[in-house]
Amino acid sequence: MIDIRRFETLGGANHGWLDANFHFSFAEYFDQRRMHWGRLRVWNDDIIGPRSGFPPHPHSDMEIITYVRKGAITHKDSLGNEGRTEAGDVQVMSAGTGITHAEYNLEDEETHSFQLWILPDSKGHAPSWGTRQFPRDDRAGRFVVLASGREGDGDALRIHADARVLGANVRAGETIEYDLGGRKAYLVPASGQIEIEGEVINARDGVAIADLATLQIVAVQDSELVMVDTA
């Protein structure tokens, strides 16, 4: 089963400095059919204006993953962590028992990002933050695990959830496969155009996937893919 959520059907809010698009119910946008997908609760497609961003605000008991598509994001939090994550790279904040953080675009250009919230398997974890570079060449023609709560996923950033966040870069005409084994997935092309089960999916469209043993993706155009595999 695949459910395509076209970009133009997403919820949204434009605050001038922030143009946000919501794949799931978020803030003042509510759609009972788009509450979550497995443990994936939020997928926001954000465009943050130059020299702006989110001032300090709190979170708890949520795994928050930011995938930067263009530009960079600068993080500061109440644990004393500071860091800058550039396009193609990922940061993870496990909010756990509570953390206050700020996310700024300190660049002279827009920052484009996907922010994902995944429900943890249990509450009360110690809060933490981390970031990692993921060279795009390593993702050529295959999925690479960027963040994971599963054992054996090597250098992936750790989250406290039975889920994986994956990235792939696929050239036009190539086909890649992923073993879902009946689990759920939510996939968004950051750029390009792909085909799944005969359906064409454009950049920034979302695809909710279930009841497939093997996911097969054909690149119609050169495409950058981000996907969550979730229980």
Image (cartoon, helix red, strand yellow):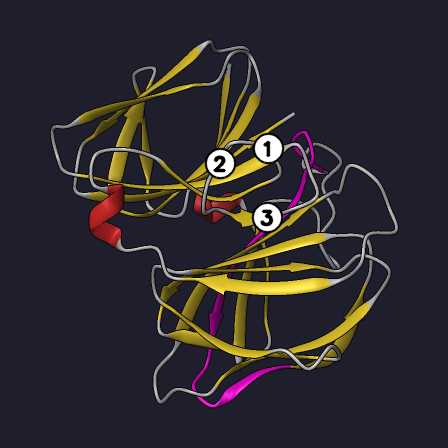
- Asked if the magenta segment contains residue 46, the reply would be yes
Identity of the residue drawn at 43% across and 86% down? 50
State yes or no: discs 2 and 1 in contact (Cβ < 8 Å).
yes
| 105 relative to 230, above or below | below
Q: Which residue is mark 3?
A: 158
Q: Left or right of 204: which side holds 161?
A: right
Q: Which residues are magenta?
A: 36-54
The mark found on residue 153 in the picture is: 2
User: Can the viewer see residue 175 in this picture?
Assistant: yes
Q: Nearer the viewer, residue 125 or 45?
A: 125
User: Can the viewer see residue 192 in this picture?
Assistant: no
User: Amino acid type of disc 2?
Assistant: Asp
Q: Nearer the viewer, residue 139 or 27?
A: 139
| 144 relative to 45, above or below | above
Indicate the quadrant where residue 140 lies. Answer: top left
The mark found on residue 217 in the picture is: none
Q: CA distance from mark 3 to mark 2?
A: 9 Å
State yes or no: discs 1 and 3 in contact (Cβ < 8 Å).
no
User: Amino acid type of disc 3?
Assistant: Arg
How far across and how far down the image is residue 41, in percent? 69, 43
| Helix, strand or loop at mark 3 | strand
Q: Nearer the viewer, residue 63 or 112?
A: 63
State yes or no: discs 3 and 2 in contact (Cβ < 8 Å).
no
- Quadrant of image for the C terminus: top right
* Residue that sits furthest to the left in the current view: 173
Identity of the residue drawn at 45% across and 47% down? 155
Q: Which residue is mark 1?
A: 150
